[in-house]
Amino acid sequence: MEHVHLAAEEDDLYSGYNDYNPTFDSEELDNDAGFQQAVRTSHGRRPPMTAKFPGTAIGGRALGTSFGSRMPMASSMGRPMTGAVQDGAARPMTAVRAAGYSSAMTRGSTFDPLGQSKGPAPPLEGKSEDTPDEKVKILEKKVNDLIEESCLAHGHGDLQLSLDRAKEAGRKERALVRQREQSGNADHINLDLTYSVLFNLATQYANNDMYAEALNTYQVIVKNKMFSNAGRLKVNMANIHFKQKNYPKAIKLYRMALDQISNSHKEMRIKIMQNIGVVFIRMGQYSDAITSFEHIMSECPNIKTGFNLILCYYAIGDRERMKKAFQKLICVPLGIDEEDKYIPPNDDTHANLVIEAIKNDKLHQMERERKALAEKFIMTSAKLIAPAIEATFAAGFDWCVDMVKSSQYVELANDLEINKAITYLRQRDFNQVGAVETLKTFEKKDSRVKSAAATNLSFLYFLEKDYDQADRYADLAMTADRYNPAALINKGNTVFVKKDYEKAAEFYKEALRNDSSCTEALYNLGLTYKRLGRLEESLDCFLKLHAILRNSAQVMWQLANLFEMLEDPHQAIEWLMQLITVTPTDPQVLAKLGELYDSEGDKSQAFQYYQESFRYFPSNIDVIEWLGAYYIDTQFCEKAIQYFERATLIQPTQVKWQLMVASCYRRSGNYQKALETYKDIHRKFPENVECLRFLVRLCTDMGMKEVQDYATKLKKVEKMKEIREQRVKSAREGSTRGTRREGSASSDSGHSSHGTSAKGERLSAKMRALPGSNEPYEASSQRDIDASYVDPLGAPMERPKTAAKKRNEDDDFADEELGDDLLPE
């Protein structure tokens, strides 16, 4: 017991745990006046007071903790408490210390483990651009940016800008090489950048048709042994020689490139061999081309090569090999999915959404384009070889149809047969064994083929003016496919020729509703409105059509004609001026311009256009008449003679042109020539009164003895003319009396016999009015000649009719042409 010591009361190990510091009494904060004062003023925002003794956590003041009011206490093992100060010395540093935390604070410091009290970090120091490495990097970036700009400019179609950027990139790249050499880094030249710059420059030279510069740049790349795989660029060089039509050089380069490409790049080798075959075709060496194409078809067959092979066999006239090549062509796999894949099932909503999303994506569009190209090549090949592989055209086409039916292109068989009928149409074979019979075989086929065949038949019968059959087949085509715009147009055409314009307009409108881009329907609708007198609506149709067909001469002509009918000659002239930029040698357009300027009073412009029209078509009587009258009005009768002499050649039985020639001689003072001309006219037309009158007048003025003979003939002809007129007049009066008796008398036998005698009297009067068998026809139509011919000495000539009047009255009617169905390219 002597070694047992009891702890003193003041040394209680568990003392102090129940001590309570009022600082932590948060419930009484509302009643703490000091705290409330600190909250309301800036007193609470003062910096904390520091310890008096630095280096310790406990200074001369009590900490605001529950342990601040008592002295540190030793542990039960005699170990000093953590953070306690013994004998005035700080606790020594331990080996284990938390990052950023310290039990001893320096004087005046706060708790800031992240160093935020020091403010923001200073800015990063900029790299100096004066160093050689930095200059090289900057130049490399500029070169890459210029190459990218060049490529983007080419993508936007600005070829000149792309070339300028490529040249600038070349200059920057050379400056970069010099910079590396000056800095002593010549061994670290960026070969990839140099290759990119040269390749882009050569490409842009070729795009701008600067072939010599492009070849030189490619040559620099190819000769540089440091560039790997540069030999492939000989393909590009060969392409340039091909464009320059230097075919031997192109073949040499293609073969050199082919030698440098390994067999592992099979697709590239196939493309180069295809180019070699095409060059041989251009050179006419079909046997060498066949060798290349046959190798391709045996290794990796494709549609284009198969088509080219057929062309070569056709060129050398090998029938059997043409058949074999056609069979290979229709067996080439396209590598596309079936169309059934894009048919959505009815029960699976998720699958329907997926199919709807991929139905018109880029992949499906590419598949459709590939299939359309294959069908085009097959159709063209069949039409090409059909007349050559068999004795007759029909037998060759039938063989092609049979081959297609047994291939993956079954649906092309019907199209081939329709093309067979179209070929008959081009050969003008309209009989029963030709086009019509071939098209009639489709009447029992499916609706699409039936509609196409019936549409062609309707168009064919319409051209033959068999409007009943055209109407029948138009109805059949509409029944098979009501949404076929071509069938609706043909139906409208058949109604149009029957002058049922309102109904025709309805069919044309329906065709436009089914296909808003159908130009034939819009053109015919404009013509229909024009016939109905709805000129404003017709004008709207042709203005819309002009927006679609900017260079259509027919549309411009219709617009000019409509503005003329709307009494706006200035607009009509504007449209005709646009028209002659499209068809500068159309004499009808030039004559119409002359007529419009004449109506506006501009004789000089009218003369210019009439003269141009006469130069291109010197047989237009209206133009000749206007020009002759113009020279007579301007007192240049000698120049008018040549136009009236041409009119005499065109219409030798019309006496007025010869009279005009004689009148021009007389007005110009050449009386002897005028007298000879009148005598010549008298020999051809002995009963012409005007000719005899001028003969009497000229002979009298010239004192010739023949005046009495011509005067006697003139009196005789005038007397015969009076007798003839009296007979015609009496015949008309008798006809009038007979008609009145027939209207007033009853229907008995006497009445019938009297009507018959009156009719016979009218016929006999007409027969008496006709000239005799030995008389010229013009002698009996003297009244017409007198009405149309007026001597220029007495009065000016009547103005000629417009040269384009017939064209206005008989508007060209736009028949429906079915494009690929009727007239394939």
Image: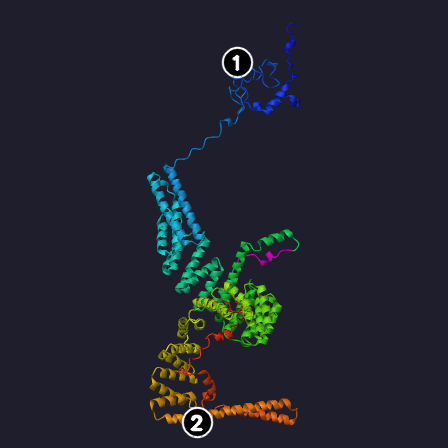
Q: Which residue is mark 2?
A: 716
Nearer the observer, disc 1 or disc 2?
2
On the image, the x and y values in percent for residue 739 come to 60, 89
Residue lying at the far top in this picture: please name it: 2
Give the mark nearer the N terminus: 1 vs 2.
1
Residue 113 in the figure: left or right of residue 131: right
Q: Amino acid at mark 1?
A: Ala
Give amino acid for label 2.
Lys
Look at the image and give the residue range highlighted in magenta.
Answer: 334-345
Q: Residues within 10 Å of mark 2 (few under 14, many from 20)?
A: some
Q: Is residue 103 above or below residue 763?
A: above
- Give the labeled residue for mark 1: 89
Q: x and y percent of residue 577 in the render?
A: 44, 67
Does the magenta stretch mainly form a helix, a strand or a loop? loop
How far across and how far down the image is residue 238, in percent?
A: 39, 56
Query: How far apart are the two marked residues, 1 and 2, measured between alpha carbons?
Result: 169 Å
